[in-house]
Amino acid sequence: MTDNARARKLADRIQVVVAETLDRRIKDPRLGFVTITDARVTGDLREATVFYTVYGDDEERAASAAALESAKGVLRTEVGRQTGVRFTPSLAFVPDALPDNARTIEDLLDKARAKDAEVRQVSTGARYAGDADPYRKPEDEDDEPGTDGSSEKNEGPASA
C-alpha cells in the first residue's frame, strides 16, 4: 500500500491536469463554465474522483456532465502522460455539493436575520413586566438587624 501523502500529491496533480486539459484541449460546446474543485485518489492509486461545479442552471449542469463523461478518455490519457505513474487511475466525475450547501446555509442565515429583525421590531417600546432588574440584591446595610446600636446578644441582667 502507498502512503496517504503520495495519494494526496497525485490527487492535487490530477486536479491541475484535468483543469488545464478542459481549458485548453476539450472543445465540446456542451461544456459550460466548469470548475474543478477537488480530486481524491484511493490508497492504491487506481481510482480518482474528480469533483466539479458548473455555473448555470440544471440544463447546463446536465450538458456539462455529459461532456465530461464523453471526454473522460482524453482526460485520463492526459493524466497518465503528465503524472508518469505506473497505472493511470480511472476517473470518475462527481458534481460538488459545496455550492448547494453554501446556498442552503445562506438561506438559513437570511431567515435567521429576518426573525431577529422581527423580534427586535416587536420588542421596541416594550417594558418589563416586573422590575427592570429581576435579580435579588442584598438589603441595604441600614436595614440589617443589629446595626441600630442595640446588641443582639442578651447579656443577662444589667448590674448597676
Image (cartoon, rainbow, N blue to C red):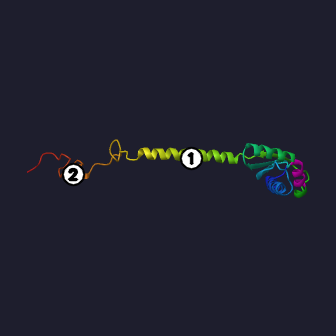
For this rendering, which residue is in front, 9 or 155? 9
For the point 91% across and 56% down, which residue is it? 81
Task: Inspect the magenta stretch and tell me whether residue 63 lies in it.
Answer: no
What amino acid type should be assigned to the residue bearing mark 1? Asp
Residue ID for mark 2: 147
Cβ atoms at labels 2 and 1 below 8 Å apart: no
Q: Report if residue 77 lies within the magenta region.
A: yes
Q: Residues within 10 Å of mark 2 (few under 14, many from 20)?
A: few
80 or 67, which is in the foreground? 67
Question: Hey, what amino acid is under mark 2?
Answer: Thr
Q: Which residue appears farthest toward the top when viewing the image?
A: 129
How many numbered marks are there? 2
Which element is circle 1 on? helix
Q: Earlier in the sequence, mark 2 or mark 1?
A: 1
Q: Position of residue 147 (x, y in %)?
A: 21, 51
Q: Position of residue 68 (x, y in %)?
A: 83, 47
Badge number at residue 10: none
| Residue labelled with disc 1 | 110
Q: Which residue appears farthest toward the front when viewing the image?
A: 29
Please indicate whether residue 100 sits to the left or right of residue 66 in the image: left
> Principal SS element in the magenta part?
helix
Q: Which residues are magenta?
A: 71-80
- Residue at 54 percent of width and 45 percent of height: 112
Does dot 2 land on a helix, a strand or a loop? loop
Residue 46, x across and y down, in percent: 86, 47
Looking at the image, is mark 2 or mark 1 nearer the viewer? 1
